[in-house]
């Protein structure tokens, strides 16, 4: 009898432990479903004022409304977007740090920089493509007048007549803005001096001030200055004309045979650190897609020249792979490198 009584407590503890197993199995899911329990940070790897920043700030309030927590923009410029992207790659994969990545950080830079501070595939979980954006070739009006440039053909002529005298601003080494210019130079056989900045915003300031001659900027950040007459636009770099400025020809249209096949558009998308729970990734993708499909935000972005997306994580991953291969060929042909 005493022996039986001694065994009873251990049997009860065993039954209690078994009873707790289903609840224990549910706890991680419940913990994840509580996300977000605090503000979420969206790292923008460029300075304020550029298209990456514009898109992030347009999307953040929509995500805040959907999830009930602030989505805070954190600008971390430098190294063509590599500084900010590397910070996100090393962040905890808990859903509280996201990156507004670009064609530069997640397709071009791997081919331009001899050593990368992150692996743009292994270190990230794609969430969704936010928008595609054409670049636009813009000049400081006074400098355009100085060199007699009123068209793409005029620019090619002026660059050939003044090798090394025209200067070309960009948002940083390896960005699509930089590569758009390098591709133009390669196809036209011209030489213009490249000046990389820590984002489109600072580059535009110097372009507007006349310290730079020209720039292949993302259309959303350049458009207000074009409409105000502060920048002279010559052409868009996409394969087709932009609905935001249908009067502008494409570089291929305006450049004739020498620029046949020219195309250098940009894109921007949300990414999370690798290992971020897929239920969080899918929830962010779904709410981003809803926001981008809403008439107000969709019309706002389209008016700025952006083409909203909101695709699935898998589709975005395939897009990154295809763009990486495409830009590797462009980089090789142009010889663009960052020491």
Image (tube, rainbow, N blue to C red):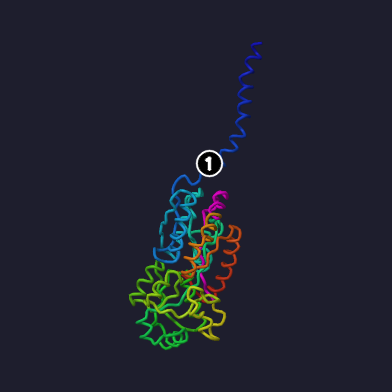
| Residue 144 pos. (x, y %) | 38, 83
Q: Answer above or below: position of 189 versus 69.
A: below
Q: Nearer the viewer, residue 21 or 311?
A: 311
Q: Is residue 284 magenta?
A: yes
Relative side of 15 to 154, left or right: right
In the image, is 333 to the left or to the right of 84? Answer: right
Q: Position of residue 304 (x, y in %)?
A: 46, 69
On the rendered image, what quadrant is the N terminus found in? top right
Query: Nearest the camera: 311 or 91?
Result: 311
Is 47 colored magenta in this rendering? no
Q: Is residue 127 above or below residue 37?
A: below
- Counting from the top left corner in percent of width and height, residue 295 is at 51, 62
Front position in the image: 44 or 298: 298
Residue ID for mark 1? 31
For the image, the number of numbered tags is 1
Percent position of residue 335, x then y: 51, 75
Asked whether residue 13 is in view, the answer is yes
- At horizontal 59% and vertical 58% (from top left) the residue drawn is 312
* Helix, strand or loop for disc 1: helix
* In the rendered image, the vertical position of residue 88 relative to residue 25, given as above or below: below
Point out the residue furthest to the front here: 295
* Label 1 Cα crowd, 10 Å radius (few <14 / some 14-19 / many 20+): few
Residue 83: tell me if it is visible.
Answer: no
- Is residue 327 depicted above or below 72 in this figure? below
Please identify the quadrant where the C terminus is shown.
Answer: bottom left
Residues drawn in magenta: 263-285
Q: Residue at x 42, y 85 (%)?
A: 150
């Amino acid at each position: 009898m005493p022996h039986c009584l001694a065994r009873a407590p251990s049997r009860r503890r065993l039954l209690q432990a078994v009873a707790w197993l289903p609840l224990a199995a549910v706890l991680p899911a419940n913990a994840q479903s509580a996300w977000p329990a605090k503000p979420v940070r969206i790292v923008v790897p460029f300075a304020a004022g550029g298209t990456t920043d514009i898109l992030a700030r347009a999307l953040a309030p929509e995500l805040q409304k959907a999830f009930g927590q602030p989505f805070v923009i954190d600008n971390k410029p430098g190294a063509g977007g590599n500084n900010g992207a590397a910070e996100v790659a090393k962040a905890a994969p808990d859903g509280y740090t996201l990156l507004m990545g670009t064609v530069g950080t997640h397709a071009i830079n791997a081919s331009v920089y001899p050593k990368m501070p992150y692996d743009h595939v292994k270190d990230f979980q794609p969430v969704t493509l936010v928008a595609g954006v054409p670049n636009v070739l813009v000049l400081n009006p006074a400098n355009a007048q100085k060199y007699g440039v009123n068209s793409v053909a005029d620019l090619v002529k002026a660059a050939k007549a003044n090798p090394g005298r025209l200067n070309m601003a960009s948002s940083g080494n390896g960005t699509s803005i930089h590569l758009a210019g390098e591709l133009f130079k390669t196809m036209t056989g011209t030489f213009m001096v490249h000046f990389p900045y820590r984002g489109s915003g600072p580059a535009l300031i110097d372009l507007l001030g006349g310290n730079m001659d020209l720039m292949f900027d993302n259309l959303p950040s350049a458009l207000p200055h074009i409409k105000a007459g502060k920048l002279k636009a010559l052409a868009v770099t996409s394969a087709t004309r932009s609905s935001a400025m249908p009067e502008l020809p494409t570089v291929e249209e305006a450049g004739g045979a020498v620029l046949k096949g020219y195309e250098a558009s940009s894109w921007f998308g949300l990414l999370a650190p690798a290992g971020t729970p897929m239920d969080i990734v899918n929830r962010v993708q779904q709410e981003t897609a809803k926001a981008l499909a809403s008439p107000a935000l969709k019309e706002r972005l389209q008016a700025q020249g952006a083409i909203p997306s909101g695709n699935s994580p898998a589709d975005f991953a395939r897009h990154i792979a295809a763009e990486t291969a495409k830009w590797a060929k462009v980089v090789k042909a142009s010889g663009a490198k960052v020491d």
